[in-house]
Image: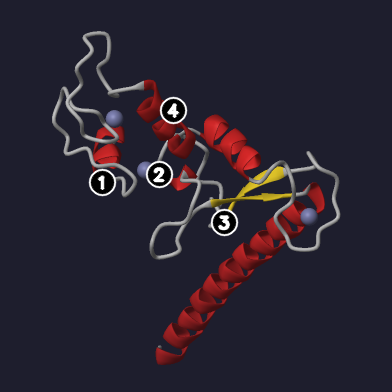
């Protein structure tokens, strides 16, 4: 998906793709100095939901710099930002995967975790990935044995 297609399909925005309209709220852009957004507010709103460094600091601010796991006693500011749905090495380029909050189907969103809790989550995700890989390997193996038997 190109950036323009993503901006049109973004569930947070209302842009219909028409040039000269705000690529977030779809209002007609009145200022001659602006091309993409109707206001600083829209520009900031879009940035903090689509550009990692803005999304990351917005998520921390929203969590008041504390780990969001209930009962966690980690120090304030001991916090890192986690994609609730693992990026699995898909990168941190701009896009709707940085939305601060999950969509209406509960997909996506960012959460703030202390270093220890974040490491736990990352380890669990790596384990899940390894399990998927092992399963795929096992499948290939059974397939080859079956073909052998047929011969
Ligand atoms: Zn706007
Ligand atoms: Zn989006
Ligand atoms: Zn924690």
The reply, left or right, for residue 147 in relation to residue 83 is left
Q: Are marks 4 and 2 in contact (CB under 8 Å)?
A: no
Up the image or down, 21 lies above or below 91; here it is above
* Residue 1 seen in render: no
Identify the residue at image location x=50%, y=74%: 140
Q: On the image, numbered disc 2 is attached to which residue?
A: 96
Q: Secondary structure at mark 2?
A: helix
Q: Earlier in the sequence, mark 1 or mark 3?
A: 1
The local crowd at label 3, few if under 14, some if 14 to 19, many if 20 or more residues have their Cα within 10 Å, is some
What is the distance, in whole Å, between disc 4 and disc 1 at their CAs?
A: 19 Å
Q: Residue furthest left?
A: 18
Q: On the image, numbered disc 3 is attached to which residue?
A: 84
The local crowd at label 2, few if under 14, some if 14 to 19, many if 20 or more residues have their Cα within 10 Å, is many
Q: Earlier in the sequence, mark 1 or mark 2?
A: 1
Q: Which mark is residue 44?
A: 4
Q: Are marks 4 and 3 in contact (CB under 8 Å)?
A: no
Up the image or down, 143 lies above or below 43; here it is below
Q: Earlier in the sequence, mark 2 or mark 3?
A: 3
Identify the residue at image location x=49%, y=52%: 101
Report the image quarter containing ligand 2: top left
User: Residue 27 falls in which quadrant of the image?
Assistant: top left
The reply, left or right, for residue 144 in relation to residue 134 is left
What is the distance, in whole Å, between disc 1 and disc 2 at their CAs?
A: 9 Å
Quick one: quadrant of the C terminus? Answer: bottom left
Q: Between 5 and 90, which is closer to the camera in this rendering?
A: 5
Q: Which mark is residue 9?
A: 1
Q: Are marks 2 and 3 in contact (CB under 8 Å)?
A: no
Q: Are marks 1 and 3 in contact (CB under 8 Å)?
A: no
User: Residue 47 falls in which quadrant of the image?
Assistant: top left
Q: Are marks 1 and 2 in contact (CB under 8 Å)?
A: yes
Identify the residue at image location x=51%, y=83%: 142
Q: Between 147 and 131, which is closer to the camera in this rendering?
A: 131
């Amino acid at each position: 998906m190109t950036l323009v297609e993503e901006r049109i399909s973004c569930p947070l925005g209302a842009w219909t793709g028409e040039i000269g309209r705000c690529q977030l709220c779809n209002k007609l852009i009145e200022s001659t100095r602006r091309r993409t957004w109707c206001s600083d507010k829209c520009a900031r709103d879009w940035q903090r939901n689509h550009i990692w460094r803005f999304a990351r600091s917005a998520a921390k601010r929203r969590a008041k710099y504390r780990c969001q796991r209930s009962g966690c006693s980690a120090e304030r500011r001991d916090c890192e930002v986690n994609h609730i749905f693992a990026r699995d090495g898909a990168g941190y380029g701009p896009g709707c995967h940085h939305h601060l909050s999950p969509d209406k189907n509960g997909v996506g969103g960012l959460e703030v975790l202390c270093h220890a809790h974040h490491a736990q989550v990352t380890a669990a995700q790596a384990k899940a990935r390894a399990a998927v890989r092992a399963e795929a390997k096992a499948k290939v193996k059974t397939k080859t044995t079956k073909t052998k038997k047929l011969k």
